[in-house]
Amino acid sequence: MALLQRPFFVLLLVLTHQFMQYWIAFGSVNEEGQKQEEEFNEELLLKPLPDRKVLAHFHFQSSAPPSTSNGRHHHIFPKAISQLVQKFRVKEMELSFTQGRWNYESWGGFDPIPSSNAKPPGVELWAVFDVPQHQIDASWQNLTHTLSGLFCASINFLESTTTYSAPEWSFPPASGNLRYGTLPREAVCTENLTPWLKLLPCRDKAGIAVLLDRPSIYRGFYHSQRLHLTSTGSGSEGMVSGIILEQTLTVVLQPNSQRAGMAYASERHIQPSWSLTSIFGKQVSGTCVLAKSSNVYLLLDRGLVAELEHLHKENEKSAENGFTSQNFWTKPSFELSADPDRIFIEENSLHSKGSSVLYKFQVEKYSESEPFDLSLTWKIPVVWLSQQAPLHASRFLMGSGNERGAIAISLKSTQLSEGFMGANADDERCDLQVNVFQVVPWYVKVYFHSLQVFVNQQPKAISDIIEKIHVSPSKDKVSPGVMEMVLKLPCKVNSAALTIEFDKGFLHIDEYPPDANQGFDIPSAIISFPNFHASMIFLKDDSVNKSPLLSKFQEKSPVMSYTEALLVPLTTPDFSMPYNVITITCTVFALYFGSLLNVLRRRVAEEERFLKEKAAKKTGRLSLLLSKLSAKLRGRQWEPPSSPPASSSFINAKLVFKVILVAGLAVGWQYFFS
Amino acid sequence: MVPLCYCRFLDRLQLRELKDSLIIFCTDVFSAMLIRATGQNLRLAYLFSLESLDLVKQIEVSEILSSGDIAALIYLWNPFTIVACVGLSTSPVENMAVILCLYGACSRLIPLAAFGWVIATHLSLYPAILIIPVIFLLGCGPDAPPRKLFLQRHQQEEVLNQSKLPLGFSWRPIIHFAFWALLWSVYVLVLCGISLKQFGGIWEMFKSTYGFILTVEDLSPNIGVLWYFFAEVFDFFRNFFLIVFHVNIIFMILPLAIRLCHRPCFLAFVYIAIFSMLKSYPSVGDSALYLGLLGWFVNELADMQFSFFLFCGYFGVSLLSPVMHNLWIWRGTGNANFYFATAMVYACLQIILVVEGVSAMLNHDRKLRNLTTGKPRDAKS
């Protein structure tokens, strides 16, 4: 019977499964009627960098529309994230794990990629809440704990009020409900990446995420994994708010140069050729089935395109064909292994440098048997520069010793401001607005009055340069110091510097991290240029709007850059000393207390009589010597015991009385407590 | 000498200009003048009491030094005072408030004494315990040998010369003092309340001034021992030791007051020495005050023991302490323990000074008693 029953049971299971699938499909068809569907898009952007490196920017976007029908259930969207958003009523949140430092000078600072994906080292978290003011801190603390569990990181350290702050207006999504915290020390590794990948519907088993080979990613120069979510807010009651979850991973990798051995001087300038297999060690063998679109882009930035155009023109001239600068990319100076499905050219609005070019490859066309492996081979040497932010910001410490020091933020103009701000320089009242946001931990006690501003190495009055300043001083062990400033610099500025002095605090031994002599990290300052927008607008096209990555590029976000994290060495006490310090200090206090009381209660005459009696009682040699010695120690003249014993019986009676008293006390104690 | 002046934040903020350093300088000079006036007052009282005990013959009056001048000179020429002045520390101001209080009480200017006491308490909290010597000063006048001695003397000689007897304890000036103290404290609190209206009011002020003093929150190195102790002590014992160390100050108030009630100025000196040793954030400015006041009792404490040792100790510590601090903080070659050791030695020296001072004063009283009662024995023993 049992043998018969089993196939039946299996059949039943299969049937239910089929039915369920059908039901789910039907459900999604129903959804399509409202044009609201959970979506998942996966994209990868590759970009050669001027210093022979390659930038790979993975962009995964899942979105859940606001709906009533789905309730708490999702097809694709990660449940953990949606629960988190519902529970803490997060309006917008960004969490980034970064290792390495974005090199603004050679990798650029103006494009949307560095401006929104270059993050400070360690963990950075900010969140905007949709709750009343007094609940924000509680929500933040709960959120940090949840994220800490979700991403296997010590984000819960951001719970304490000393680590997070509430910027008022200098942080771009300015709002009163914003909380911002960083952990510059946090080490980022694969245990943070794995939970991040778990949020993707195909994890790293299919689609573009297959490329995320751990050893090759962590071998890179810069690695930043970011999670950004926006909840669109529920319009009506009972509606579950829609969420857009954006997961990006930005890596800067060094391709293995295959022609490294070449001895030609000219060949040395040639950029290294690379392919997906050479930089990641893997190839894309098809899309993630659940993804709506799955694309790979190759971006040539403005500087590179301008350089290529220039080279192309020269070639054409020499071939006396007359130049048609538009089709240089059809006969380019590099070779792609796959034909692009589409080529976008940036709509050039502002920049004279040229416009960037984007090649699009659809992964759908490739399969297991014919995997997608993009490779780029340079034919001619090319040297170019990435576009920089108007000012290059760096921050450093001044002074020596562990008593005090100064923080300096220096802003240096880059070629951008020389170039295209030259057009505006005719105006007398041309200003360059710079926002500075800086958080310092409480043990770096900043003296805000010592703020000094230098423009072109000349000290300037603060009121001339700083248009707006907001300072919240730190409180010991309660809150960090926050400084927000708006600087108005003249356009022709070459360099500007801000310095501010501080005293170093002294901590309790428990407050030092395990490796105390390494020093403490001051989180990066954020420098943003609200008048400059990092956006790349590609030709208006339907497909552009459909691609989340490209629509992200079109958003007008202010140019932002992070400064370096500072390492401040603090004085350390001796960590092995607590017992010694406690005992020695207590001894000194006991010395004080005892000797003072002794002096106060001593009566000279009585004491002498007592001494004499004692000496008379015991006329041993030792006691004689002792009394002599003690008299000498006390600085008095020693008197030989001459007077006869006064009343030894009295002493005895006294002694007996004492013994009886103590015994009585002991008996009473015993009786009372038993 | 950076750790020696504590309130540097205030200094950096406001006292940067030369004119501000001039203010500190003038404060010190003014304090010295008040010390001199009080010292002369004390000397007159001492001479008067000797005369009334008929001891003028035994103790040659020409040997009695003018303690006011000595005290003022010690105060002004003390390197600690100079350092506190040059470092633009606020401790000269606190010291001046304390001296104002003692001066007012000695010369029976009750409103001035109350003002000094209230301001000193407001500035550094610990001078609050000076209310006991001030009450004795107002109640029965400046330092004199015990009252019992006078009575004995007069019984012995059977001369009832009332004019030579010191006055008994009178409550009237104390009630005056209480009234004025209340008035001044209300005045100060109202002023503070008005100026701190936007910053959380008076309660916030209490919490971040007196609270800051009582819960030793700042662990920056200073010449005391508490910063290192609280930097190292286990967190769950912290409250216990806070209580123990503050009770240590309060505990000695009563025994000292009982034993030294006839010498209120010396009592005030001992209190000042004790709290400048045990306070949460001591500085050399505090030491400068009690070392200056030590000059008042130059006649009484002439027989003090270990005075040369103490002098050498103070000298050595004030040379070594900056060196150790420099080695630890600036050069990074030393260790916190080296600096802590000098602080420890300094605390021991202060303890010896207080204990020996009290002991010498009690011996002096014994000597006077022996002289009056006419015992042939050497008064010193």
Image (cartoon, coloured by chain):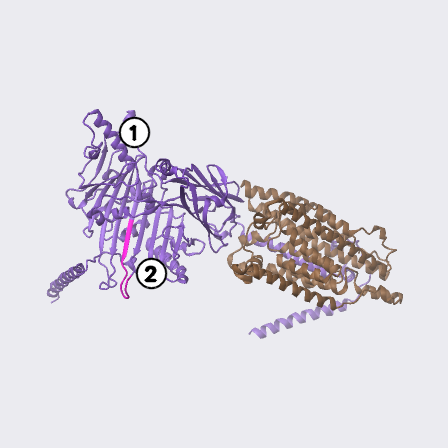
Identify residue type, mark 1. Answer: His
Q: Nearer the viewer, residue A621 or A481?
A: A481
Element carrying mark 1: helix
**In this rendering, position of residue A119 left or right of residue A552:** right
Note whether residue A367 is visible: no
**In this rendering, position of residue B40 left or right of residue A79:** right
- Image quarter hosting the N terminus of chain A: bottom left
Q: Identify the residue under disc 2.
A: A89
Please tell me in which quadrant of the rendered image residue A35 appears. Answer: bottom left
- Write down the region rendered in magenta: A234-247
- Image quarter hosting the C terminus of chain A: bottom right
**Residue A469 position in % (x across, y down):** 46, 49
**Residue A173 position in % (x across, y down):** 36, 52
User: Would you call the spot at circle 2 few (<14 residues within 10 Å), some (14-19), or many (20 or more)?
Assistant: some
Task: Give the mark toward the camera: 2 or 1.
Answer: 2
**Residue A261 position in % (x across, y down):** 28, 28
Residue B364 sits inside the magenta stretch:
no
**Residue B344 position in % (x across, y down):** 62, 50
Please tell me in which quadrant of the rendered image residue B40 appears. Answer: bottom right
Identify residue type, mark 2. Answer: Arg
In the rendered image, what is the letter of the chain coloured brown? B
Residue A236 sits inside the magenta stretch:
yes
